[in-house]
Each structure stands twice: as structure tokens, then as C-alpha cells.
Image: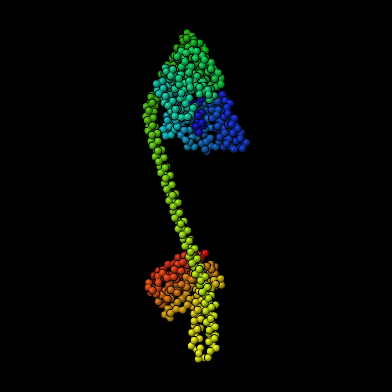
Amino acid sequence: MKNCLLSCLLCLMPLCMVAQDDELPALREGLEAAERAGNRDSMALACAYLTEYYAYRDADSALYYGRKGLEHARRDQVDPYLPLLINYATAYANRGDMREAVRHLLLAYGESVRLHAPAEYKVAVLTSLGVCYRRREMPDSALYYYKEALGVLEKDGSYEDRTHLLASIAVLYANTSRLDEAEDYARRAVEASAKTDDIDMVFYAATTAGAILQRNGKSEEAATMLRPAIAKARAQQKPMFVLKGMVYQIDCFSALNQMDSVARYMEQAEEVKRQLPENAAEVLGYEENRYRLLSRMGRYRESLAVQQHLLALRGVNAQTPVDRLYRDMARNYEGLEDYVHAAHYYGKAYEAADSLHREQVNADLSEWSVKYETKEKELEIARLTQEQLRQEARALRWAVVAAVALFALLCGMLYYFLRRKRVRKEEELRLAQRYIDGMERERSRLAKELHDGVCNDLLGIGMQMQCLSPGEEGKMLPMIERVREDVRHISHELMPPKFRHVTLPEAVGDYVARLSVPSSMQLSFVRDGSDEAWQRLPEQVAYEVYRIVQELLSNIVRHSGAAQVEVRLSLKGSWLELTLADDGTWKNDASCPAGGIGLDTVEERVKALGGTLSVENEGGRQVRTLVVACR
């Protein structure tokens, strides 16, 4: 992101030298791979990288790749569309075509607003617009866009944005001969550049500050500041920066009257100049410096030729303020003793310097200085507030992390306890089932022993007694028969019918019909549901419910003293409901033990079925209700 903006940040400077380094082949290979894949997004991104590379090396190549990238870039997303558009505008500025640069920068700003782009895009575009308008000799428009950039920078902006804006404002003040204010802004730009790793911003701030310091009579300090900046530009193979630094360095050596150094740097500057477009800002700056040196050496006509070339660029890509250019031309004509032309250009210089427009610009600059001082203080307060908010946010994040960790721990503990409870319940169910299975096996064994042993023995005794004389067996035979029937009945209770052949209502109905009850008790059985539905009831469920009916009904008959007893079986969807209601009087005494083995067995069976058993009093009746899932 930062690199995408560099081409519009550094005063829209040109560069045409193609440095063959390790970076360029990789960038070209990336574009070729994207073209082979036919991926438009990848092609646009690869072109964006190439425009960044050529931004300070070759303006024509930057234009070529910028145009190609814009053909493939999506217009509905910021990257890489907006960086391509900005770099495309920058390439025009690097060629000296300020009108096209302004047109594309205005388009880029409109697109940044439409796409809700980050503030750094808007600050870069607005500052670059100010630079372009300054170079077109429209300082009021330049000042307007600088103010707009500052307004955006107040809300959000990086030290790179701050460096660019401060240095650009310093140039504007220097061009209006307000050198003390220009120096102040230039030093602030250097301070801001020290807080960023962007070497281009560091160079831009250093060269701007060096130029202004030299004009303000501080040549030695300016030379000291410019020397490392030029060395860095050479190391990065950026002739644009090299030439710009050399121009300012030549001014410094000239002011210090070190003409040998001036000659040496002029010779080197001529070599670097040939690598750049003739209307590039750095070339024009060098030409301005050259005409001054020529004038100083008394070569007035050569100096005038350079000045006429610079004068032709007025309103397009001006390097020197026009009033100063007119004044320097007048001095050259004066050196040639052409006093008519000298007077003419002196008049034009005073006219330009004293115009109402210039007075208004100076007034605006004075107002700007006051406002900027206030804004800078507000920005510092805002930065401190933002830092405090970041610290509070950091503390809040740690609090959230701690809360999440605590919540996770509580969830883990809850899961552990619930799992233990479930395991314990499953173990209880297994134990209950084992208890019931053992009891059923014992009941089956007893039923078989009673049926095959005692019943048969009683039958044999009865048959032998029939062989006795009528007087001897008359009293014993009925008693033995009754005992045999009782034993048989007990055997059947212990071994109920197989539910493969009968339904649960049929088995319960048969049991109720055969159950011996007191003559004062009325026992009834009611069933709901079709035979087909009851036939689908699992055999194990039917068996357990049958045993529960036996136990509960046995307790009611023995202990309740009820006159009315009702047994009801119902199927309601996937739920089986058993209801036993009686109007007896229950007492918690020896006749109805509260914790008898029978009731414990009922609880174990209910638990094994996963059902619920409730006891309620309704209108003088005690109602026991069993609800079990039958699927």
C-alpha cells in the first residue's frame, strides 16, 4: 500500500532510467505468468507492481503499465485500481504534462471518495494536486488542496503523509519568499520523516529542507544535510533524486564560493540530466541553477536562452516563480547593456510581485500558518488520546481473553460434572437392569419348580386319594385341589404370558380378571388404542409395564381398602401411559410399608424404562401415573 502511493507522494517527480536489478525480472515474470493464466485480477496487480517500480525510473514505462493495468482492474475495489490510477496520473506529471496529471488526479480523488478508500489515498492525491497547481503557477488552488489534505490528515494519516504535506507546504512558502516559515515547515518535515522507514520520504524531506536552508543563508548546514541524501539516491539508482540533490548542493557550494566543487557537481549533473525528460521538474530545477551560474560568470546570452525556455513553460510546468524569473532576465539584459529590455522585464517583475492576486495569496498563507499551528496542537492531542484508547483497548482485549478462558474453564467443569452424572446414571440403570434380570430369572425358576414340582406332586396325591374309600378322601380332596390351583395361579403370576403372542392390554386384562379381590372391591380395566398399535409395542417395555401393574395392583388390593379401583392403559403417539386410581385410605403403617421390596422393585423397573411414576390425590382418589416412551 505504501509503495503504491510513493509515485504521487514525492512531488510527482519523474524518472526514466531503467535500472536492471534483481527486482525487475521477477516483476516481469509475474506479469507473464498472470497473462498465461488469463487472470485479470493477477494481471492488474502485476501491472501495479511494475508502475511502482518504474515510478522513479521511466515515466513512459510507468504510463504503459499503468494503462495496461487499468484495462484489467476492477472498478469496484480499491486495490489495485486506485494505486494504478494515481500512478498513471503521476507518470504524466513526471513527463511534465501537468494538465493531464491534474485531470487524472481529480478522477483518482473522486474514485477514492466513491470507494470509501483509506485516508492515506486521499491525503496523497490532495497533496499531489496542490503540487501540480503550484507548478502551474496557481498558488491559491495549491493552498486550497493543501488545506483539504490537512483536514483529512487530522482524522487519519501516517508519518509518510505528514512528511509529504509539510514538505510541499514548505516549497509553497519558499516560492513566495517567506523563507523563515518555509524553513520551519521543512524542519518539521524532516522530523516526521525520521519516524518512518520510507527512504523516499526521508530523501524528499532532506532535499527540500536543504534547498530552503541554502536560500535562507545556511549553506553549510544545507550541504551537510544534502550529502547523505545524494549518496542514498545513488545507491538506489534513482537519478531523479540524484539530480535534485545535486542542484541544491551546487547552490550551497556556489554560496560558499567553492567553485571547484561547483564545476565537479555540474559535470556530474549533466550526465544524470541526460537520463531524464527535458521538461522534468529536476531538469528544470537544474536549468534554473545553470542560468544563474552562467549569469554569474558573465555569459548573459547563454543564461537568457535558458531563461526563455523556462518562460515558455509558464502555466504548464513552471519551476521558478515568474517574478523572480523576470527579475533575473532583466539583470542579464542589464549585463548586456540592453537597458530597454532590462527596464521592460524589471517592470514585469514588479507587476507580478505586487499584483492583488499575490497579496491575497500572502494573506491566505498567513492565515494558514495560524490555523496550522492550532491544528498541529489538536493533532498532538488527538494522537495522545488515540494512544490512550489503544492502551484501553489492549487492556479490554486481555480482559476479554481472561473472561473467555474463565468461561471455557467453567464450561469444561460443567461438562465434566454432567458427564459424571450421566455415567453415574447409566451405571445405576445397568445395576437396576441386572437386579431385575436376576429377579426375573429367580421368579422363572420358582415358577418352574412350582409348576413342575409342587403342582405335579399335589396332582399325584389327589389321584392316590381318589383310590381311597369314599369316607376317607371326602374332606381332603377339595383342600388339595384348592392348594394346587393356588400354586398354579402363583406360578402363572411369576411366569406371565409371552408378549410375542399377546398384547399388553390382553395380558393385563387377563390378570385383572383372574385376580382375587375382596367382595367389597370393584376392579375395572380400561384400554385405549388399536390392537395394531399395541402389537408394535416393544416386548421388553410390555414386560416391565406388566410387572409394574402386578406390583402396584397387588399393593392396592392388600393395603388400600378401596371400594373402586380402575386400571387404564393408553397409547398417545409415542408415549405409553398407565393409570391406577383407587378411593382407598392409605396409611404408612405395618400393613403398607413405605419402603417395601415391591415398591423398590417398581422404582428400579421405572428407572430401567427411563420413564416417570407420579402419585397424586384427585377428588379423594389416589392416582398413580406411569409415563414411558414406547419407541
Residue at 54%, 87% (x, y): give it. Answer: 466
Residue sitting at the far top: 337
- Give coordinates of residue 506: x percent, y percent: 52, 74
Q: How many labels sit on residues?
A: 0
The answer to which image quadrant residue 361 occupies is top left
Of 542 and 162, the residue lying toward us: 542
Of 248 and 284, the residue lying toward us: 248
Determine if residue 311 is in view. Answer: no
Of 609 and 588, the residue lying toward us: 588
Where is 200 relative to 393, above or below?
above
Where is 434 relative to 52, above or below?
below
Question: What's the coloring here?
Answer: rainbow
Determine if residue 272 is in view. Answer: yes
- Give coordinates of residue 41: x percent, y percent: 57, 37
Residue at 40%, 70% (x, y): give it. Answer: 594
- Give coordinates of residue 376: x percent, y percent: 39, 30
Residue sitting at the far right: 36
- Give coordinates of residue 118: x percent, y percent: 47, 35
Where is 354 relative to 471, above or below?
above
Residue at 49%, 63% (x, y): give it. Answer: 430
Residue at 47%, 26% (x, y): give it. Answer: 202
